[in-house]
Image (cartoon, rainbow, N blue to C red):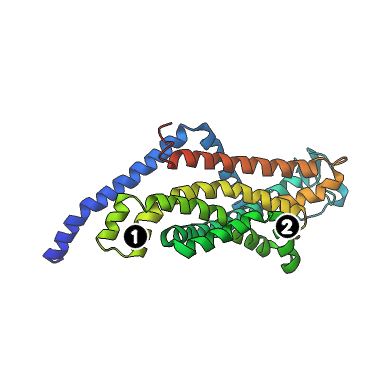
């Protein structure tokens, strides 16, 4: 190693050490904030359990989710036969409700996460462009957002599903490409505040290019709001997926989803209440867990709320 390389390594080592210390202190702060928040712990446990079901669902189900057993049709929770115990009962084809609830989490998580990533990315990008560029670009983007906000989502879903046809890809595209307007509005407001701060003005004065100013100084300061909104939107997206699948506009068989299970059980609600009750409970618990975790993230990442 030549002397110049040694000199650069010596100069860089304090910066690397400072970076590691900042990362360590940030992780410690998040961990301590989580331990002080019972709501955050409950939300993290629920979300972790749902993610476990979504990833390892077929490996931990007590029965094969799609295997019919006509001799065990409409059996109540706790029923047992030669094939085992059905803790949550069976449906009209004798399939195990618990196994189907576990496997059904996969589609809900998949749709919720991918749709939120798509809509969040589009919304943050358009919000930054709208606020930083301004002028007619700002006007056009915000008016398109207003137009989408003014269209009832269910009408838009019926129109698109009727034209393209229902399905998993259609549902993800529908939820992903129509949910960006909230991100764009919130990001635009954050960028308008950040771009007026002194450090952004100083970066412009010293001659930094506009895209560097945006990437280095503006985007990092508005991402926390987008992350919190995305965490809360996952629950809303799961509800939307279940609602559309229940109406026949979302995911179609042979996929197993909580919305389809609700649709199958609605006509038997009087005689086999467990068919629709347990998928409904799964949706409720999952959405509450996501909301709890998002609420904790908001309190932790928002500097205005840290001291409260």
Q: Residue at x 78, y 55 (%)?
A: 67
On residue 155, the disc is 2
**Could you say where residue 163 lies in the image, as x and y percent from the top left?**
74, 68
Up-down relation of residue 219 to residue 273 (above or below):
below
Instruction: Choose between 287 and 206: the one closer to the eye.
Output: 206
On residue 286, the disc is none
Instruction: Choose between 177 and 58: the one closer to the eye.
Output: 177
Left or right of 231 in this view: 215: left
Counting residues from the start of the chain, the first of labels 1 and 2 encountered is 2
Query: Tag 1: Cα neighbours inside 10 Å, few (<14), some, or many (≥20)?
Result: some
Label 1 belongs to which residue? 213
Q: CA distance from mark 1 to mark 2?
A: 40 Å
The N terminus lies in quadrant: bottom left
**Could you say where residue 139 lies in the image, as x and y percent from the top left?**
51, 61
Left or right of 117 in this view: 153: right
Q: Are marks 1 and 2 in contact (CB under 8 Å)?
A: no
**From this viewpoint, which residue is outermost toward the bottom?**
164
The quadrant in which residue 85 appears is top right
The quadrant in which residue 217 appears is bottom left
Instruction: Choose between 148 and 247: the one closer to the eye.
Output: 148
Residue 31 visible in the current orientation: yes
**Could you say where residue 306 lies in the image, as x and y percent from the top left?**
41, 36
Instruction: Choose between 63 and 292: the one closer to the eye.
Output: 292
Up-down relation of residue 38 to residue 67 (above or below):
above
């Amino acid at each position: 190693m030549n002397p110049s390389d040694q000199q650069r390594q010596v100069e860089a080592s304090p910066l690397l050490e400072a970076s590691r210390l900042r990362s360590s202190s940030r992780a410690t702060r998040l961990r301590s904030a989580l331990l002080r928040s019972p709501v955050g712990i409950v939300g993290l446990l629920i979300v972790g359990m749902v993610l476990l079901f979504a990833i390892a669902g077929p490996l931990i189900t007590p029965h094969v989710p799609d295997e019919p057993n006509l001799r065990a049709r409409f059996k109540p929770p706790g029923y047992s036969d030669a094939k085992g115990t059905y803790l949550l009962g069976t449906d009209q084809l004798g399939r195990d409700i618990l196994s189907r609830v576990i496997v059904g989490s996969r589609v809900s998580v998949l749709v919720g996460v991918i749709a939120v990533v798509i809509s969040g990315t589009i919304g943050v990008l358009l919000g930054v462009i709208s606020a930083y560029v301004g002028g007619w670009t700002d006007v056009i983007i915000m008016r398109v957002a207003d137009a989408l906000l003014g269209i009832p989502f269910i009408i838009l879903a019926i129109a698109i599903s009727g034209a393209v046809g229902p399905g998993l890809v259609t549902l993800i595209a529908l939820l992903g490409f129509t949910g960006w307007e909230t991100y764009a509005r919130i990001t635009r407001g954050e960028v308008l505040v950040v771009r007026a701060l002194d450090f952004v003005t100083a970066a412009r004065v010293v001659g930094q290019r506009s895209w560097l100013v945006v990437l280095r100084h503006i985007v990092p300061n508005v991402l926390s709001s987008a992350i919190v909104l995305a965490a809360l939107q996952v629950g809303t997206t799961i509800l939307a997926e279940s609602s559309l699948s229940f109406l026949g506009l979302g995911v179609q068989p042979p996929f197993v989803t909580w919305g389809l299970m609700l649709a199958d059980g609605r006509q038997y609600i009087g005689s086999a209440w467990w068919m629709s009750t347990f998928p409904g409970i799964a949706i409720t618990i999952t959405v509450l867990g996501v909301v709890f975790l998002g609420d904790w993230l908001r309190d932790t990442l928002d500097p205005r709320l840290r001291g409260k």
